[in-house]
């Protein structure tokens, strides 16, 4: 029995899964229930997953915006008949309200089933909707027993109507008689109120009158209850008799209707499932439209995405996951709200271990989050926020270390990191032989740099040794030894183009402006300029190395010269030591040389 | 001859009428039945019995209630509550179980997303005249939805029967006008009943702050300025104070929960107009009475005025005035001479006493008059 979740809570929250999951928004209770029961596809379910992805891709093509909006409006109009259906199918009587709900379900659902734009989706059999509606007698928007009535009921309805008119006529006749005899008409309650003293003689006469019953005398009036005459009594009895007979006839009509509906129990259930499925599918399409996303693609069974480190491309690693022009929806929406725009990124994650290096603020974490998010979406057969995403099934996706949070459990940040990474390791082993996708965001950052780097290297090596069949890992790291590790795929955020930065206010780049003038990063405009100068794209690089852009950026941001000089000197001293980084800065762009850019100045 | 309430309502464009009680057992349902009978006859003189029976030719009435009702017996005294008698064609919004007790055949039109202990609220069309029970709608926001749906299904005149919270539905924007039901529960003589009703009628007659354009011209120009300045405060649901020099202050409504408004920090001593979003109570009036006169206290609408006659009189005696932000007109006062315990007040005397305090609002005897 599987007890290890595909996404655990820390992973889900770290990659922004709750908001994305909520954005997949079915509009019917059927769709919402189906969504709650929706599970990711896991290794071993490739065939079903492939079918689901194919259906998603077809839906994205088949449903245009207007039909999508119209169909979702139609779905919203569907009542929730689950409880009524349950009651009906258990053989209990059918109430009129439930009959209306079931009829509305069939009427609205039938309209959707006949919609030519939706018929392309082959989501249901239109004839079944029509057939189930037949016992209701008409296809109108309301329900009354009249529409399912038999002759007896109709006859009783007519008798009741006639008797009611006759009764009302007799009452009016009696009221008029009392007006003539007593000078007043009975009130709405059938009481004669004779004002006194003016009407005292009439009141005294009425007290002896058999047609009324004296109720009381007050200083102002004598009050009599008008006793119904024989015709009123007769018609009253007739109305009561008709009502009683009508109630019984109604019960029989409803029982007959219920029986007819009950006989189609399996079809009812299928139609409910059809609606749930359509709702989920259209919600997927709506999600893709919102993101400008696409359907993920499954890597073929013939291994067109590699599961081993040998052979293949020049790097020696074939991709396990390919992401094209992806944008994390949470990040995109946050930046859009501020008038900014996210740079779409491409990433080719190789099977085995991948290391992403790059400057701070360069988008390493966001890129890793995006890969994990797209993977989770793909395994749920949901669209991804990208122009393309190709992958395979993993048994679990794990993120670590846990993002920083207030110390509420007594563990230091380091303790939490170790505990988290250990948990991931055990989950990964428990999933064997199925592969896990492990995302590590700067492991080793919570302890001193030397030990941190040693631990980060150790994790990378351990994951590498586990083999690409067991794990695909993406690790964002600043550590140069991690970035130089052999046998792993190296990636780099392109980083800041210092030549694109405007000179900081107050003086030429690298010179201290006067103390009272703002520096490059002191203002919103300066930070915006810095953000615009960063190239957030990820690229594969040959050989590892950590780009050293921090001090240059700090200089632009206005780091005091006294500090800047010392930082540069310290870095130079470190390069002289045998343990120092092997790579040296290449002009303003530091770190390894990207593929295809060797020899560029 | 009956007062033509339906004609009066239609002439003024009032299509949604709330029925509110001056007290418990005031005769709201009796008044509702009176207006239903009038609506049946509307547009025909006289209607034939067959027409009345089928509902043909008359106005299509929409009915709902608000409050904790749904019992056939009165919750306090255990006596039977009057039924609502509806003609064929009437539209009714009520809870499923309440509708199941109707003796009229019904056409079910729509189930609304309003739950209640008696089931979901549904809208039905009455196919044969009969009795219905109104229940299930307990919140004002639901009344709005119900009225919109009744109108969408063809109701030309909507009647909202108030229940436990007797003024719950009397809110401008929700309804266009109200019928105030009055019974001897308020007093043992016509004069005592009229005396109790007078401040309620006065409440509904309160002028709006710079309300009607024509009236505003006749009033001090500052009323219009105050209204303009306090509009934003009202939109935010705050207590507002406006001074003749244009200074305007807003305070969160909760700030005055445990202290007098005049004790709020920075309360302007020169305030001329105070807008209060919630209930206007004796405590509120007493707390502000010592403010330099004249101070115009503005309630959001008439049903928010809960202060007693004594407190209101003292308020005016101190040189202050009352206004409402949005008025709600009274369509009629429905007099019910019958006391729930069995005795009656003299009908003519009661109506005469009530008419004396009602001004131009018609007073009807919903029990005795032929609709």
Image (cartoon, rainbow, N blue to C red):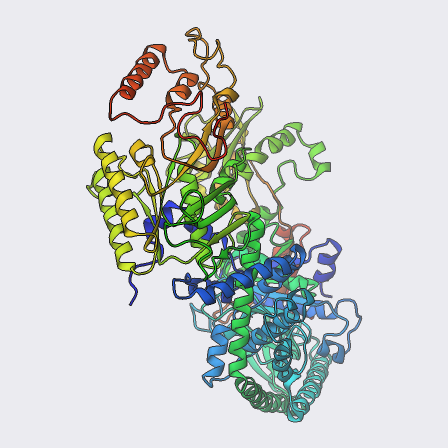
Q: Quadrant of residue B273?
A: top right
Q: Quadrant of residue A449?
A: top left
Q: Where residue B156 sits: x, y (%)?
A: 70, 63
On the question of residue B101 being in view, the answer is no
What residue occupies the far right of the structure in this picture?
B45
Q: Residue at x 29, y 21 (%)?
A: A575
Q: Where residue B57 sits: x, y (%)?
A: 77, 71
Q: Nearer the viewer, residue A113 or A202?
A: A113
Residue A3 falls left or right of residue B183:
left
Assign the N terminus of chain A to one quadrant of the image: bottom left
Q: Where residue B247 sits: x, y (%)?
A: 54, 24
Disc tally is 0
Q: Where residue A581 sits: x, y (%)?
A: 30, 27
What residue occupies the far top of the structure in this picture?
A514
Give the answer, above or below, for where A110 lies relative to A287. below
Q: Residue at x 28, y 51 (%)?
A: A466
Q: Nearer the viewer, residue A117 or B351?
A: A117
Residue A294 falls left or right of residue A180:
left
Q: Nearer the viewer, residue A405 or B310?
A: A405
Q: Residue at x 56, y 66 (%)?
A: A278
On the question of residue A362 being in view, the answer is yes
Q: Residue at x 38, y 23 (%)?
A: A550
Q: Nearer the viewer, residue A397 or A67?
A: A397
Q: Quadrant of residue A156?
A: bottom right
Give the answer, above or below, for where B90 lies relative to A373. below
């Amino acid at each position: 029995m599987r007890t290890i979740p595909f996404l655990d809570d820390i992973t889900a929250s770290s990659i922004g899964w709750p908001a994305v999951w909520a954005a997949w928004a079915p509009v019917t209770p059927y769709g919402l229930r189906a969504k709650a029961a929706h599970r990711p596809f896991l290794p071993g379910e490739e065939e079903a997953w492939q079918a689901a992805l194919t259906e998603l891709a077809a839906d994205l093509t088949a449903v245009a915006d207007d039909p999508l909006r119209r169909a979702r409006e139609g779905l919203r109009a569907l009542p929730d008949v689950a409880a009524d259906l349950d009651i009906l199918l258990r053989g209990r009587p059918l109430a009129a309200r439930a009959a209306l709900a079931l009829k509305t379900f069939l009427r609205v659902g039938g309209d959707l089933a006949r919609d030519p734009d939706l018929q392309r989706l082959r989501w249901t059999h239109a004839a079944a909707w029509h057939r189930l509606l037949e016992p209701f007698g008409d296809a109108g928007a309301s329900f009354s027993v009249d529409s399912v009535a038999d002759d007896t009921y109709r006859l009783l309805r007519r008798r009741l109507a006639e008797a009611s008119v006759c009764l009302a006529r007799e009452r009016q006749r009696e009221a008029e008689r009392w007006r003539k005899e007593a000078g007043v008409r009975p009130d709405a309650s059938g009481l004669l109120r004779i004002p006194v003293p003016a009407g005292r003689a009439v009141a005294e006469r009425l007290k002896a009158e058999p047609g009324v019953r004296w109720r009381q005398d007050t200083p102002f009036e004598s009050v009599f209850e008008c006793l119904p005459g024989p015709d009123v009594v007769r018609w009253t009895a007739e109305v009561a008799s008709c009502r009683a007979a009508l109630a019984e006839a109604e019960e029989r009509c409803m029982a007959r209707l219920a029986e007819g509906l009950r006989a189609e129990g399996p079809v009812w259930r299928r139609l409910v499932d059809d609606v749930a499925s359509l709702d989920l599918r259209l919600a997927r399409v709506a999600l893709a439209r919102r993101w400008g996303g696409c359907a993920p693609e499954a890597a073929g069974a013939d291994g067109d995405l590699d599961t081993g480190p040998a052979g293949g491309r020049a790097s020696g690693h074939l991709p396990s996951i390919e992401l094209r022009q992806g944008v994390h929806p949470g990040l995109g929406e946050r930046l859009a709200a501020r008038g900014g725009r996210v740079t779409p990124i491409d990433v080719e994650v190789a099977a085995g271990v991948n290391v992403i290096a790059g400057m701070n603020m360069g988008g390493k974490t966001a890129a890793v989050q995006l890969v994990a998010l797209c993977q989770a979406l793909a395994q749920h057969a949901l669209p991804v926020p990208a122009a393309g995403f190709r992958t395979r099934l993993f048994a679990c996706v794990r993120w670590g270390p846990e993002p920083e949070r207030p110390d509420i459990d007594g563990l230091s940040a380091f303790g939490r990191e170790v505990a988290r990474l250990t948990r991931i390791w055990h989950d990964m082993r428990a999933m064997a032989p199925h592969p896990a996708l492990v995302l590590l965001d700067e492991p080793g950052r919570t302890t001193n740099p030397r030990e941190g780097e040693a631990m980060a290297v150790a994790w990378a090596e351990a994951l590498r040794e586990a083999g690409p069949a067991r794990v695909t890992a993406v690790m964002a790291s600043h550590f140069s030894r991690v970035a130089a590790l052999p046998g792993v795929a190296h990636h780099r955020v392109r980083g800041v183009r210092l030549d694109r930065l405007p000179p900081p206010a107050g003086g030429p780049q690298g010179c201290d402006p006067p103390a009272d003038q703002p520096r490059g990063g002191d203002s919103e405009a300066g930070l915006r300029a810095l953000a615009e100068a960063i190239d957030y794209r990820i690229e594969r690089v040959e050989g590892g190395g950590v780009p050293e852009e921090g001090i240059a950026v700090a200089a632009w941001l206005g780091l005091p010269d006294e500090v800047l000089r010392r930082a540069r000197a310290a870095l130079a001293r470190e390069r002289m030591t045998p343990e120092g980084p092997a790579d040296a800065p290449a002009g303003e762009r530091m770190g390894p040389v990207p593929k295809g850019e060797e020899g560029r100045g | 001859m009956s007062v033509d309430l339906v004609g009066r309502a239609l002439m003024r464009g009032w299509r949604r009428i709330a029925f509110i009680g001056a007290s418990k057992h005031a005769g709201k349902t009796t008044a509702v039945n009176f207006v239903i009978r009038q609506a049946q006859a509307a547009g025909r003189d006289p209607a034939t019995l067959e027409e009345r029976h089928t509902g043909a030719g008359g106005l299509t009435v929409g009915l709902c209630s608000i409050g904790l009702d749904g019992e056939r017996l009165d919750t306090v005294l255990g006596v039977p509550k009057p039924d609502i008698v509806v003609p064929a064609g009437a539209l009714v919004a009520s809870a499923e179980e309440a509708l199941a007790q109707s003796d009229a055949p019904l056409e079910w039109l729509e189930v609304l997303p309003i739950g209640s202990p008696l089931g979901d609220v549904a809208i039905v069309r009455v196919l044969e005249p009969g009795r219905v029970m109104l229940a299930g709608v307990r919140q004002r926001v639901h009344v709005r939805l119900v009225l919109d749906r009744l109108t969408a299904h063809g109701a030309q005149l909507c009647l909202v029967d108030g229940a436990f919270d007797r003024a719950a539905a009397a809110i401008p924007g929700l309804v266009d006008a109200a019928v105030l039901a009055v019974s001897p529960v308020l007093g043992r003589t016509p004069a005592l009943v009229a005396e109790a009703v007078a401040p309620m009628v006065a409440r509904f007659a309160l002028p709006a702050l710079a309300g009607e354009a024509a009236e505003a011209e006749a009033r001090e120009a500052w009323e219009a300025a105050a209204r303009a300045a306090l509009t934003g405060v009202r939109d935010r649901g705050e207590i507002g104070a406006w001074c003749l020099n244009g200074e305007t202050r807003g305070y969160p409504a909760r700030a005055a929960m445990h202290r007098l408004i005049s004790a709020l920090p920075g309360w302007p001593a020169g305030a001329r107009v105070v807008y209060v979003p919630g209930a206007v109570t004796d405590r509120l009036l007493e707390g502000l009475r010592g403010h330099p006169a004249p101070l115009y206290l503005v309630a959001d609408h008439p049903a928010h005025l809960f202060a007693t006659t004594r407190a209101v009189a003292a308020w005016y005696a101190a040189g202050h005035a009352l206004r409402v932000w949005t008025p709600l007109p009274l369509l009629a006062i429905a007099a019910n001479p019958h006391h729930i315990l069995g005795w009656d007040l003299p009908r003519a005397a009661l109506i005469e006493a009530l008419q004396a305090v009602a001004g131009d609002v018609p007073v009807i005897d919903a029990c005795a008059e032929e609709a």
